[in-house]
Image: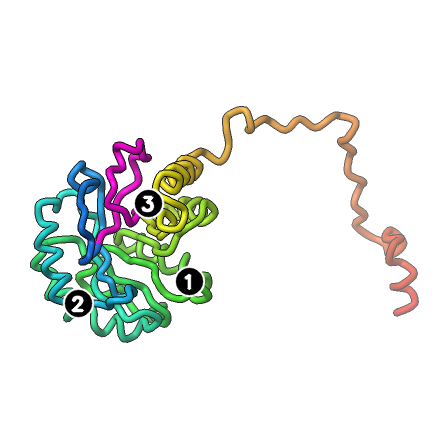
Amino acid sequence: MLYFAATGSNLDALGAHPNIGIMTGPRAANYVPIRTGRPWASDCDVLSRHGYDEAAYFKHLVRMQPFHATCRFVVVPDLPGNGEATHAMFPYLARELADSGFPLAYVLQDGCETLDFPLGCDVAFLGGTDPWREAWGATLLARARAEGLGTHVGRVNSQRRVQALALTACDGADGTYVGFRGLKRGISEIGQWLNAASAPLFAPEDVRPLVTPERAVRPAAPRPTEGLDAQPLFAEEWRRSA
């Protein structure tokens, strides 16, 4: 699983885990880690304080063309919290972005659980409100994988969530952990999360044959096949009810 951090710093110089990539966007100014070959994905800034700017997004995608080979997806603009509107907008917005050649991510928002994945999407990106994600996230990610789509989850900022997603074979996640934890410490801890998530649940020495002591094995009592009195636990009750 990949984890996309929002930073323009040189991750190789920090000794970052190889599965840490970059989440970039229209207002990103530094592409150093992408130039060094790190995998990347792009948000569209719908949730930023600036909001989505179509011209800025298209200009950004033109700038990213030299790094096409390491792109995992670019987000097709969505309407936060509204799955039906996001689904309805997707065909038109995806058509405009298709010429970029980048894989397109469809953002799953509240209410989309009753809808099919739209044609043209390559990655199912789990957004939505927290209560809705908890109720529908696992189901939608499983559906996406069954249909051959890539899977990604946003707002992942803890080891617990990374490990939970690893169990679903999710392709990637992103979050703002580095922003509030600090670059060096945050990148180091995310690397620890990824190592923990990829570790096997059981080591060979944890799996041992079960040996039951002979004294603990008791032969089963013969099972009565006829006669009411052969069932002492229930005989009196049966007689009283007869």
Lower sequence index among marks 2 and 3: 3
Asked if residue 132 is positioned above or below residue 153 in the image, the reply reads: below
Q: Residue at 36% across / 72% down in the picture?
A: 111
Eye-nearest disc, 1 or 2: 2
Lower sequence index among marks 1 and 2: 2
Occupied quadrant, residue 81: bottom left
Occupied quadrant, residue 57: bottom left
The image position of residue 238, as x and y in percent, is 87, 64
Secondary structure of the magenta portion, mostly?
Answer: loop
Q: Which residues are magenta?
A: 1-24
- Name the amino acid type tagged 1: Arg
Label 2, on which residue? 53
Label 3, on which residue? 3
Lower sequence index among marks 1 and 3: 3
The quarter of the image holding the N terminus is top left
Query: How is colour applied across the structure in the image?
Result: rainbow
Residue 133's disc is 1
Determine the CA span between mark 1 and mark 2: 27 Å
Residue nearest the observer in this picture, 75 or 141: 75
Eye-nearest disc, 2 or 3: 2
- Name the amino acid type tagged 2: Asp
Q: Residue at 17% across / 61% down in the picture?
A: 120
Q: Is residue 15 magenta?
A: yes
Secondary structure category for the residue under label 2:
loop
